[in-house]
Image (cartoon, rainbow, N blue to C red):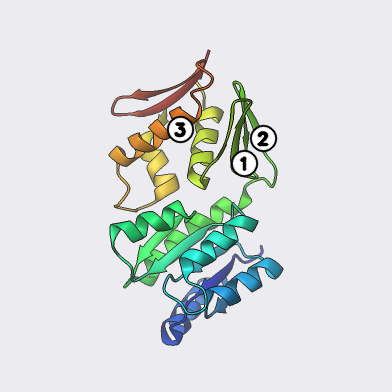
């Protein structure tokens, strides 16, 4: 079985050495780079299964690096590992396409668990198209297409629409959704998920046959009349 390759980007040498050694001891292949520019150059040539990014780095910060990586690969899991702990920084990270965000200082065990969860998403198909009513969901490019509009979606938006569609007419538990796509992130709550679902309903509003219903206290169900 091939090892999961992690591109670990951290300019603090002592921390990088400890983290890289710990990850390798747990069976991961680790490629370390000291700044965003070096990481981007490597990724464009070699790729990786999971990217772990510090935010405050020389030459190119983590937020900029993530933005550039997302231009070439919308699916590779990205985890920010940062001393920036303000809510606005966390929100910015997710809006730029992060799949997870861990605040420093952290425990290596937590990082390993988060990476293991992200690495399971690597098996996603290279090309996958779903016809949802009058829409086409392109999970390769993270685009929702309709003859009246085309929306560029985030990884989580694509995955949630896909999951609801694959389980249409059946309730998808809200706790399962939060655990699968947000892990143990205490920032993201059930209330946040309601807002997230509302945004997805808006994306799908051109086809009034598509309905996403909140089953109070349980979860969400997609129906297509």
Residue farthest toward the bottom in the current orientation of the protein: 14
Q: Give the residue number, with chain letter if any, for mark 1.
A: 139
> Please, what secondary structure does the residue beneath circle 3 have?
helix
Q: For the residues carrying marks 3 and 2, which lies nearer the camera in this image?
A: 3
C-beta proximity under 8 Å, tags 3 and 1 = no
Count numbered badges in the picture.
3
Q: Is residue 27 visible?
A: no
Residue farthest toward the top in the current orientation of the protein: 225
Q: With 96 as the anchor, is 126 left or right in this view?
A: right
C-beta proximity under 8 Å, tags 2 and 1 = yes
Picture disc at residue 200: 3
Residue 99 percent coordinates (x, y): 47, 54
Q: Which residue is drawn at 32% across and 57% down?
A: 88
Q: Is residue 24 visible?
A: yes
Q: Give the CA distance from mark 3 to mark 2.
A: 17 Å
Q: Give the residue number, with chain letter if any, for mark 2.
A: 129
Residue 225 percent coordinates (x, y): 53, 12
> Please, what secondary structure does the residue beneath circle 1 have?
loop
- Estimate how packed mark 2 is, as few (under 14), some (14 to 19) or many (20 or more) residues with alpha carbons within 10 Å: some
Q: Residue at x 49, y 67 (%)?
A: 52
Q: Is residue 225 above or below residue 176?
A: above
C-beta proximity under 8 Å, tags 3 and 2 = no
Sequence-wise first label, 2 or 1? 2
Q: Give the CA distance from mark 3 to mark 1.
A: 15 Å
Q: Is residue 50 above or below residue 155?
A: below
Sequence-wise first label, 3 or 2? 2
């Amino acid at each position: 079985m091939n090892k999961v390759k992690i591109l670990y980007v951290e300019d603090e040498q002592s921390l990088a050495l400890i983290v890289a050694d710990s990850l390798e001891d747990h069976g991961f292949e680790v490629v370390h780079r000291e700044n965003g520019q070096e990481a981007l150059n490597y990724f464009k040539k070699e790729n990786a299964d999971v990217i772990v990014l510090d935010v405050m780095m020389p030459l190119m910060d983590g937020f900029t690096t993530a933005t550039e990586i997302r231009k070439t690969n919308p699916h590779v899991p990205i985890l920010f590992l940062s001393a920036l702990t303000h809510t606005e920084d966390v929100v910015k990270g997710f809006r730029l396409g992060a799949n997870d965000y861990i605040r420093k200082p952290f425990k290596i065990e937590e990082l390993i668990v988060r990476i293991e969860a992200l690495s399971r998403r690597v098996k996603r198909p290279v090309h996958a198209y779903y016809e949802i009513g009058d829409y086409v969901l392109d999970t390769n490019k993270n685009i929702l297409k309709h003859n009246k509009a085309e929306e560029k979606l985030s990884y989580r938006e694509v995955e949630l629409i896909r999951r609801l569609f694959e389980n249409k007419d059946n309730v998808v538990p809200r706790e399962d959704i939060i655990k699968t796509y947000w892990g143990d992130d205490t920032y993201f709550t059930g209330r946040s998920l309601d807002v997230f679902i509302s945004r997805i309903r808006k994306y799908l509003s051109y086809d009034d046959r598509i309905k996403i219903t909140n089953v109070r206290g349980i979860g969400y169900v997609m129906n297509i009349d």
